[in-house]
Amino acid sequence: MNIAPISDAGGAIVSGIDLRRDLAPQDATAIRNAFLEYGVVVIREQDLNTEDQIRFCNAMGGTATRGKPADQRADDADSAYDGAVHVVTNLTEDGKPLGSFGDGEVWFHHDGSFKEIPYAATVLYGMAVTSTGGETVFANMYMAYDRLSEVTKKRIDGLDGLNVYDYASTGRVDLEQDISNINHWVHPLVIRHPDTGRRALYVSPLITARIEGLSKTESDTLLEELFRYQEDDEIIFEHKWKAGDLVMMDNRSITHARRDFPAGEPRMLRRTMVEGVSIGP
Ligand SMILES: [Fe+2]
């Protein structure tokens, strides 16, 4: 097995491994260590069924399950897996979406930051990918934190953010509506990664709707400053998909976004998650 970094901002390619077979304990440890060090690991040229992908998540710390969002059709064919397997696709059947996220770009976010216990990792497997576009873009949130001014670091120390995920919205969440039935949770703006001990900025334009205890104007202004990480090329890297790619990202130290892609071309990724633990400042 070989591990090669992708960029100065993070990511590593792991090669020389076939995930159809059980991982040897030392290989599982090496992949997990690379995941923690680089934030994202990419394992190419795999031929994986759902069972293989779940086995991989189990080897990485345990497969997380998620109920189906009431207003979406997750992959019915995989309902046997109790909400552990979802399909990210633009494909439709009888005019209705078959999976989560349709066409177009998706803003930066951490998967599961609206939950009390966010997922440790998201694992995506490329089943059908577009000829161009649709890249997954990653931002290193340790670096995002490190690059804030000392004044801003002091200012956000001890502050919490309200993280809301509204499946019906593709932009900033509207807090004028009643959010009691929408997934949401309050987490610190800066977390200490439970495995590495490093501090990471924990906000995203898709999901962080408000900073608790500030006026709307103060909150919006400060969030706008914190969201600037998404334009900082030095902390951003990307993955250009090929079918057979398996990508695992750390949902504590990395935010991800999706670039636009040609409408009408089929795109399908199989998504599973690795269970997380509580996060705190
Ligand atoms: Fe995501």
Image: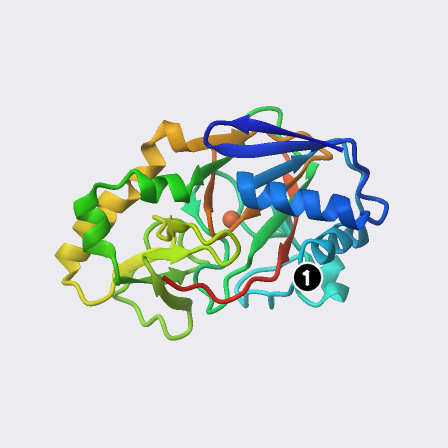
Using the image, determine if residue 71 lies above or below residue 37: below
Q: Quadrant of residue 86?
A: bottom right
Count of labels in the image: 1
- Cβ(mark 1) to ligand 1 < 8 Å? no
Q: Outermost residue toward the top?
A: 132
Using the image, determine if residue 207 lies above or below residue 79: above
211 left or right of 61 in image: left
At 49% across and 67% down in the image, what residue appears? 278
176 left or right of 74 in image: left
Residue 68 lies, in percent from the top left, at 60, 65
Q: Please tell me which residue lies in front, 27 or 212.
A: 27
Name the colour scheme. rainbow
Q: Could you say whether the residue bearing mark 1 is in a helix, strand or loop?
A: loop
Residue 140 lies, in percent from the top left, at 43, 40
Q: Quadrant of residue 143?
A: top left
14 left or right of 19 in image: left
The residue singled out by tag 1 in the image is 62
Q: Residues within 10 Å of mark 1 (few under 14, many from 20)?
A: some
Q: Outermost residue toward the right?
A: 21
Using the image, determine if residue 98 lies above or below residue 177: above
At 29% across and 38% down in the image, what residue appears? 147
At 37% across and 75% down in the image, what residue appears? 180
Residue 105 lies, in percent from the top left, at 45, 38
Instruction: Name the quadrant of the N terminus.
Output: top right
Residue 138 lies, in percent from the top left, at 47, 37
Residue 90 visible: no
Amino acid type at circle 1 is Gly
Residue 37 visible: yes
